[in-house]
Amino acid sequence: MQSHKVQGLVLRRHNVGEADRLLVVFTDNMGKWTLRARGVRRPLSKFVGHLEPLMLTNLIFVEGKSEIGTLTSAQVSSTFEGIRSSLTKTTVALHLCEMVDRATVEHNASPTLYSLMVTTLQTLERHSALLSVKPAFIIKLLAALGFRLESNQCAQCQEPLERATLGFSAAAGGIVSGECARGAHPLTANDVKYIRALTSMSLDHIHRLRIPTTLVMTTTRLLDDAFSYHTQARLKSKALYEAFTPRFERI
Ligand SMILES: [Zn+2]
C-alpha cells in the first residue's frame, strides 16, 4: 500500500459508521480525494480539530485497493480564523469550495487550482471587499479547468471586438460582438473592462478597484451562467451566498 504526504483543504465531509468520517479533500499535488478518517468523531481522536472545513491541513494517507484513501496523520497548518470568525466570509468561502467540488473529478492533479484556492482564501481572510472575489474566482477557476473565457476578441469568430455591439455568451466562451452578439447578453464597454480586469489581475489588486455594485452583480450572474454551462452543476450554496450579499458592504 502506497503512502502519500500532501497538503489539503477539506471541501465537504460526512459521517459514516460509528465514529468515522469521509472527507472530500482538494490536495496540493494529487487533486481531489475522498479520505476516510477512522474514529474522528471520538472525543479523544488524534484528528479532532485538524479536519474541519476551511482549514489547510498536512495529511498523510494510504492508498488502498478502493478509490478511497485512509488517513493516518493530519496536522492543521492554517485555520483561516479571519474567515471562520465571520459568518459572511464563511458563506462566501464555502460557496467557492462547493464550486471546486462540483467542477472537478477525483484524482486529477491541479496545483494551479490548489494555489488559486489558497490565495483566494488568504485574500478573503485579509480584506473586507468581498463582492469581486466570486466573479474573479469563477474566471480563474474556469481557466484552471481549461475553459479560458475570451475577452480580447470575439469568442465566436475571433474578429476584433466592436464597441457598439458587445455581448456575453457562455456557449461561445466569453465576449462576442457584431452578428455573433445576436441573442447574447448585451454588455457595455465598462462591463468588458471589468471582465478583463478580473481575468488578468490578481485578487489582491482586484480588491482595490472601485466598481459599482450593480456592475459586479450583473457580471457575477453572467459568470454563474458560464460556470453552470461548463460544469452542468446546480450549486446548493448559491441561494445562501445571494442572501448574504447585502451584508458584504458592512464588513
Ligand atoms: Zn464574432
Image (tube, grey):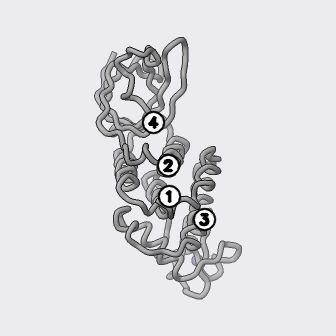
Secondary structure at numbered mark 1? helix
Whether disc 1's CB lies below 8 Å from ligand 1 is answered no
Label 4: which residue?
A: 53
Residue 222 circle label = 3
Nearer the viewer's eye, disc 4 or disc 1? 4
Q: Which percent across, then down, holds residue 237?
A: 60, 46
Label 1: which residue?
A: 134
Nearer the viewer's eye, disc 4 or disc 2? 4
The answer to whether the residue labelled 4 contacts the one labelled 2, judged by CB atoms less than 8 Å apart, is: no
Dot placed on the residue nearer the N-terminal end, 1 or 3: 1
**Residue 101 to residue 151: above or below:** above
Label 2: which residue?
A: 96
Residue at mark 4 to residue at mark 2: CA–CA distance: 12 Å
Seen from the viewer's position, the closer of residues 110 and 219 is 219
The answer to whether the residue labelled 3 contacts the one labelled 2, judged by CB atoms less than 8 Å apart, is: no
Q: Amino acid at mark 2?
A: Leu
Residue at mark 3 to residue at mark 4: CA–CA distance: 28 Å
The answer to whether the residue labelled 1 contacts the one labelled 3, judged by CB atoms less than 8 Å apart, is: no
Q: Amino acid at mark 4?
A: Pro
